[in-house]
Amino acid sequence: MMHIFVILLAGGIGSRTKTDLPKQFIKINDKYLAEYSIIRFWNWFKNLNKEYSMFFPEKMIFVCHKDYLNLSKNLFSHYDLIFTAGGNTRHDSTKEGLKTIKKLAQQKEISLENLVIFIHDVARPIFLTKELNEVLNVVLNRNNQICLSLASPVVETIV
């Protein structure tokens, strides 16, 4: 059995957007930007065992800037997330998410060799559950530790 965790990176402070709140907390069509990623992963978790019985969805870790931890909990607590403060950089925030997963795995006595960890930037919510399943198919066909990056070619840009 492989156990799936998701690290949702939301540590930005919005310095480039020049808004009152970081972009992950900006509403677009009645949902916060971060919520689109949360919902996509949450729905994928709910349906995962129907197609992939060898994978068990564990938890999603929402990693955000310490100044926005309470706001994150208030906005997204109904999604059964684990909230943790990130670090000064995306790398540091990823490490904080990994530390949280390690603690959870130890508490549940899950071997670290049986983990599949998705790391996702919530400010980029455009992805398909089909693509998440494709990642799982690669994991199934490998018998060693691997690292994958899901990317799409850019065909248009806005300046």
Image: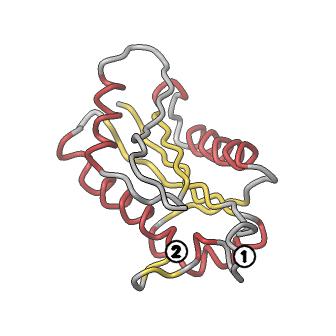
Specify the farthest residue to the left.
Answer: 50
Q: Is residue 120 above or below residue 152?
A: below
Classify mark 1: residues with Cα within 10 Å, few (<14), some (14-19) or many (20+).
few
Specify the farthest residue to the right.
Answer: 88
The answer to whether residue 130 is left or right of residue 31 is: left
Residue 157: assigned label:
none
Identity, as a three-letter code, of the amino acid under mark 2: Phe
The answer to whether residue 116 is left or right of residue 104 is: left
Residue 18: assigned label:
1
For the point 69% across and 80% down, the residue is 19
Percent x, y of residue 71:
65, 79
The answer to whether the residues at label 2 and label 1 have Cβ atoms under 8 Å apart is: no
Judging from the image, what secondary structure is the residue with disc 2 in?
A: helix
For the point 71% across and 83% down, the residue is 20
Q: Give the residue number, with chain letter if any, for mark 2.
A: 76
Classify mark 2: residues with Cα within 10 Å, few (<14), some (14-19) or many (20+).
some
Judging from the image, what secondary structure is the residue with disc 1 in?
A: loop
Q: Is residue 144 above or below residue 28?
A: above
Q: Is 84 in front, or is 134? A: 134
Specify the farthest residue to the top.
Answer: 143
Percent x, y of residue 112:
55, 28
The answer to whether residue 64 is left or right of residue 36 is: right
For the point 33% across and 33% down, the residue is 136
